[in-house]
Image: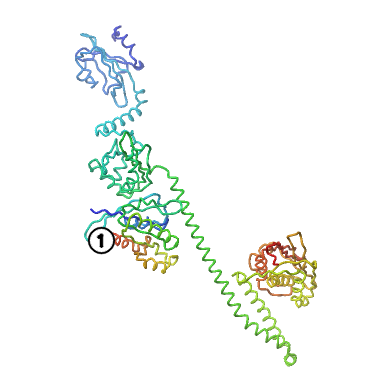
Amino acid sequence: MNTIPKKILNRLLKTKSPLSDFCFIKTNQKGIIKDYFGPINKYSNDTIKKDEPATEFFSFLNGLYPFKEKELMLSNLQIRKKKYTNVLILNEENKEVWILFFDVTRSVKKYEKIISRRNKYLLKEEKSLASENDNPLGHLELFEIATFRKTSPEGYKPKGILPEWIYQLKPELQKMPAPYKLNEVFPFLDVFEMEVADFWKKNESGIYKSGQWIESDKNGKEYLMKAFATNHKGKSYLLLRMLNNELSGGQEVYQKAREQQLAYEKLAKAENRLKELLEYKEKFVSIISHDLRSPIASVYGVAQMLTNDDELKSKLDDFSLEMLYGIKSEMARLLDYNDKLYHWSNLELGNFNINLEKVTVKKLAETVARTAEHALKNKNISFQTNIPDTLTITVDITLFLQALNNLIANAIKFTPEGGIVGINAQRDNVDKITISVYDTGVGMPEDVKEKLFKQQTTSMGTKGEKGSGLGLGIVKKVIENHGFDISVESIPGKGSQFIISIFEKKDKVPN
Amino acid sequence: MIKKKITMLGAFAVGKTSLVQRFVRSIFSEKYHTTIGVKIDQKIVQIDHQDVNLLLWDIHGEDEFQKVKPAYVMGSAGFFIVMDGTRKNTMNIGLDLLAMAQKVAGNVPFIILINKSDLKNDWEITDSDINNLTNKGYSVILTSAKDNIEVEKAFLTLAKKLLN
């Protein structure tokens, strides 16, 4: 290889290109390769040969021979696929031409993305410049915003590049001559224009926003949109923005709130329907039990009369007599059941008035004892009371006695023969009185106690007594309607105690 | 071609969007999807051998969250007041919107649509309520977007009224 002339070497050292992988070819003034150096073949598709025209291997040299300039620099030349080089051509007049190659592929790759982006931008810029429609508000199309300047009462001129979506949604815009009659394309703008008329007219600063609206393209794809009005250097602008890619938090909130409202309306409707059905049921029970009372009471009266007729009884054999007593007993039970049903349904319907009166607890207990006298005697149960003589409460006497009678009847039912039932009462403090109805009966397990007032419960008494299951329901209703509380304590095998807590309110006490 | 703006007004979830979708695209979705803002659709119909482009403005339902902007009704050639037969309160909201729309759009034709006739057994709006509306001279059509009952008739009836 010939040595590189000092002049060329000095120039080579001044170059800013990387010297790694440096290589060159040397041609005469006619372009015939006379020598080469370094990995020159990576820049050519064919193997470099001496005495061949350089243009055969490097097409970029076509038209350059004979060289007129002393020096020529070609930067970032893509000489092969994915191979970039800087080329420095040095012409020694009347001697050789030195063509030096510097590999810059790595640095070009590094900036390829940036260059590509810049090129795209430049292309758009070129298009924009070509349309002479620069957008003075900037490149808003990059944010999916279409910009229009209002040029007449009905006309809008597009500014800058319009985003793709607007042509997908309204392809007719491509054929429409500017200025566009946008109201015809976007009917929503009819309303928006009215809203912003003053804003534009007065050339106010800031941005005026429309509400959201939705339009569909010919394929049914929906576009969520918003319009904005603004003024810039004395001109009025309309911006249309597509919001499809934006999360609409408001939409979710409205959706959930309205779904909840619909669910609430459905529940309220179902509740009303249930209330109507329940009321219908109570009315039905009330009417039936009222109408049944007379015939049942008549049969019971006849049975009672017959069992009191000694002459008749003397003529009956034992079986007939037993049947007669059976009829009387069952009719008495049926009458009691029917009465409870009637009271219960009326309590549920609210068909009663509470007439408050002052009464001593002792007097109430005596009345209850008289009512229960027969049942107590029947099971040889003793009735005890521990009540201060002057302890007075204010209640509806009829209703409250009904509650106490039910509690005592219940106590007798579940107390074995020879046991004790009773009523205790005491003033706990100035405002509170407690009345307890207790027994030494069979008591009840925890699960029975828990659902005692919640649902209709019934079971046989200690002597096979049957019940309606309504008694405690009536008690609870009466106590609650007085504004009192009732609770129960019970120990299986030892007995139960129903505790009525009476809270005295001065305004409830009659004069 | 003649263009006519028709506005759909009513409480939320009465079926305004479903009625438009049934009329324009012959589709129905069971899922409730609340409308935010305004949804604009178009359909060309032929009335007395004349093509008419109906611009259907489906406006969000009125409730405590969103009140209907009277401006949306401006320029309407006619409007529908949509009620949900299963929810009586939608009748009161509909009648309030009717008053607003008449104030804004003037004396233009309108029809009251009582929607969800497929759920007639669950209706809270009674025959007596409907009679009260018709006695006031209002046109009332019972529709079902779900079962496509009287939907086409409702739109075409209003379109005819717009041209007369």
In this rendering, the answer to whether A143 lies above or below A453 is above
Q: In this view, does A406 lie to the left or right of A232?
A: right
Numbered circles on residues, count: 1
Residue annotated with mark 1 = B164
Q: Is residue B47 left or right of residue A286?
A: left
x, y percent for residue A231: 33, 37
Q: Which residue is drawn at 21% across and 20% down?
A: A62
Q: Foreground residue, A384 or A324? A: A384
Q: Foreground residue, A360 or A460? A: A360
In this rendering, the answer to whether A237 lies above or below A383 is above
Read off the chain for label 1. Answer: B
Q: Looking at the rendering, in which quadrant would you find the C terminus of chain A? A: bottom right
x, y percent for residue B153: 31, 63
x, y percent for residue A90: 26, 12
Q: Which residue is drawn at 38% across and 46% down?
A: A211
Q: Foreground residue, B103 or A504? A: B103
Q: Foreground residue, A413 or A279? A: A279
x, y percent for residue A351: 60, 71
Of the residues shown, which amino acid type is indicated by label 1? Asn
Using the rendered view, name the quadrant where residue B11 is placed.
bottom left
**Residue lying at the far top of the rendered structure:** A6
Q: Looking at the rendering, in which quadrant would you find the N terminus of chain A? A: top left
Q: In this view, does A389 lie to the left or right of A396?
A: right
Q: Residues within 10 Å of mark 1 (few under 14, many from 20)?
A: few
Using the rendered view, name the quadrant where residue A132 is placed.
top left
**Residue lying at the far front of the rendered structure:** A511
Specify how the rendered protein is coloured.
rainbow
Q: Residue at x 39, y 62 (%)?
A: B115
- SS at mark 1 in the image: loop
Using the rendered view, name the quadrant where residue A163 is placed.
top left
